[in-house]
Amino acid sequence: RFNNSALVMLVLLLVETASFAPSNISCGSQKKQSWDLRQLSIMSSIQDSSETPSRREFITNNGNYFLLLSSMSVMVGNAPATAAFNKEISYSAERPVAILGGGGRTGKEVAAALAKEGLYGITMTRTGKLPVLPGYVKDFVQNYPEPVDVSDADGLLKAMQSIHASAIVYCASASGKGGNAFQVDDAGVANAAAAAKSLDARFVLVSALGVDRPESKGFKMTNSLGGNYDKIMDAKRQGEEKARSILAKSKNYMIVRPGPLLGVKTKDGASGIELNQGDIIGGGISRDELAGVVVGALLSEKKGATVEVYRTKTRQKIQPEFDMISGNEVTADTYVGLFGNVMAD
């Protein structure tokens, strides 16, 4: 039963919600009203584009990472899903999540995962050619109407300032028609981390499994793809190191290292995923699963950590001499719960 003070506070909250832009408060399963970038003083028309090829799919289909996936299933003890929600950040319409590389398949899955949780985001692309988003996603995620080049530090910061980003999710990577590995996976990551630092925003970097294992078969194969992808694993490792250095004081980052991206969507959700640390064990993961992990990283109170993510049933050693159990395995029933026992870098 409400006391008088609580009732007054509830009425004030409802009045404020009705008179302001939509918040991320839901009532049952009711859809939240659509929102508009004009709330953030961005006054340009938005055009949808056709689906763009996945950069990571190119790498995966050309010898990405370590070994052929096996169907081996090794079960380990479940960690309790006790990671708390990050109450300090609302990811609201007023301070949305910026998705760099938002035109790629992983970026669009992150947009969908945000919408599923009732969180607000803005996709950003290098070309300004914007992705087609399903109707339900558009209730929460909109497209930034101008090109955003991660190699342009000043332009990137201005874009983040214009939307008042509360978090930056970095899904961008080298591409055949865009920047090379050192422009995007190295310098671009540093620029995004610096922007996150300037805005006191959370930074989630989608990197790659095996970047700490230059002697592994997968590292060598991926690193020698040539063209704009040449030395991409070196670039990703340097990008990670720069992000950690730039955000060393706040520790307000999470680095997520997926294995090869699988085409079949998840049936089990978070319960089929395992997190690990130490770049010892890995496996495949679908984009929707990866997106769930990214949103879990946004919502977790854990900071300053690097994790490898994969479907538990595909787990295997990155190098033959490694043990099959690292001792750092974590499973949970929710994506945010996966971060419950994660250790800081």
Image: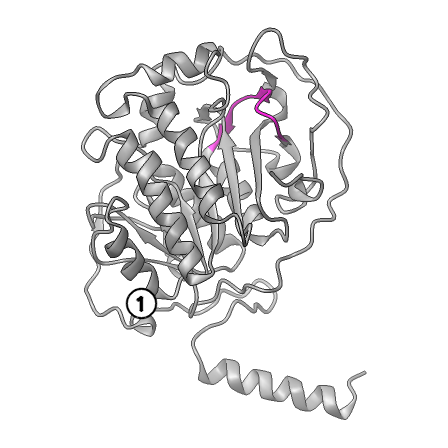
Read off the magenta span: 276-286
340 left or right, relative to 236: right
Question: Residue 139 in the image: x percent, y percent?
Answer: 41, 62
Question: Residue 182 in the image: x percent, y percent?
Answer: 29, 32
Residue extending farthest to the right is: 1
Which kind of residue does numbered mark 1 sit on? Leu
77 left or right, relative to 148: right
The answer to which image quadrant residue 279 occupies is top right
Q: Is residue 215 above or below residue 151?
A: above
279 left or right, relative to 245: right
Instruction: Identify the residue at horizontal 44%, vertical 18% (top origin).
Output: 65
Judge whether residue 229 is colored magenta.
no
The answer to which image quadrant residue 328 occupies is top right
Count residues near mark 1 (Cα–Cα under 10 Å), then give few for <14, some for 14-19, many for 20+.
Answer: many
Between 231 and 118, the one nearer to me in the picture: 231
Residue extending farthest to the top is: 320
Instruction: Identify the residue at horizontal 27%, vertical 51% (top origin).
Output: 153
Instruction: Identify the residue at horizontal 19%, vertical 66% (top origin).
Output: 44
Q: Is residue 59 above or below residue 292?
A: above
Quadrant showing the C terminus: top right
Circle 1 sits on which residue?
37
Does any portion of residue 299 appear in the rendered image? Answer: yes
Between 31 and 243, the one nearer to me in the picture: 243
Question: Residue 7 in the image: x percent, y percent?
Answer: 70, 88
Quadrant showing the N terminus: bottom right
Q: Element type at marker 1?
A: helix
